[in-house]
Amino acid sequence: MDVDLEQLRINYSIMDDDALIDIYYTADLIDGARELLIKEIELRELDTEYDKYIFHQEQINIAKNESINKVFSPIYTYIVFFGLLFFIGLIFETFSSDLGRFIWYGLGVALTLAVVIMFGFGLKNKLKKSADDVGSIVHNQLSNVALEKDNALDSVENKCFISGYLYSFVWETFNRLGCKDDSIMRENINYICEGVYPTVLWDIFQKGEALGDTFNTANNNDMKKAQNAYEQGKDAGLFDSMEAHDNRVVPKNLFNYLLNKPINTYG
């Protein structure tokens, strides 16, 4: 595989420190590309100690969780407040007070609404965080592909694979959170695509899905290849999502497929 090492050196030089270290640990680079990466890391005197890299990633996750907690704290406060007033209403009800009855039922409804909102809002935030995580995974893989190969997203089969991979990865991830709504999944796939490669990646997803649709009865060889690539993408996305969640394996199937390397599936 021919790689423009000079262009690669320029790409490395404009990347931020975190991106360089991320590639150092997650990308499967050819020797020349890895040597350039190491030179850039040494030039910046970056620390590549693995424990520190993992610690840094954990700090990023902690920061994300803290931002979510800031949103949820007021909701928990309101629930406790409503619960206390509900209890006061119950005491009044014990003494057959009309006011107590009014407080009890009114705040009972308010508490119920607060709980419903909390769970709905909580799920929405979990889905948003998961979409951000999937977006980072896809972005890292496509960025690493771009460092080694030009026009990797152009072929019909690659478009179909990307589409199947995205849908299956998001489907498996959201199903674990209890979301089985296809429209919500597609909304978040659009959100992921626009965050990774605005306009272009969403267009690739839609075209790949249409071409890879197994209900399409066209019998020509190109259509069969497109459908096979789409199904391969679905299998690869499922594998990466489950292995990342269950065994903390860094997802690489998208990267590997686009560079014509073997992929892993459960099949």
Image: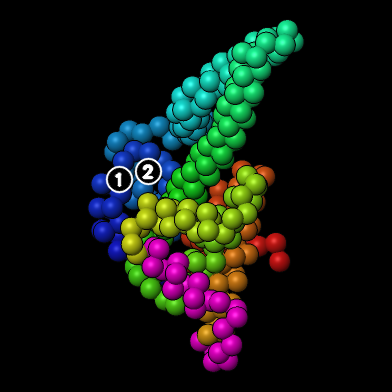
**Circle 1 is placed at which residue position?**
15
Q: Residue 168 location in percent, x, y?
A: 58, 60
Magenta segment main secondary structure: helix
Query: Rounded to the nearest whole Å, what is the CA distance between mark 1 and mark 2?
Result: 6 Å
| Horizontal relation, residue 102 to residue 5: left or right | right
x 33%, y 58%: residue: 198
Report helix, strand or loop for mark 1.
Answer: loop
Pinpoint residue 140: horizontal percent, then vertical percent.
43, 51
| Residue 259 drawn above or below residue 60 | below
> Is residue 109 found left or right of 162 in the rendered image?
right
Give amino acid for label 2. Answer: Ala
Q: Is residue 147 left or right of residue 161?
A: left
Does residue 39 show up magenta in the picture? no
Residue span colored magenta: 201-222
* Image x and y of residue 2, in percent: 36, 69
Residue at position x 44%, y 35% in the image = 48
Residue under label 2: 19
Q: Which residue is found at the position 43% from the left and 57% from the top?
A: 190
- Mark 1 in CB contact with mark 2 (< 8 angstroms): yes
Kind of residue at disc 1: Met
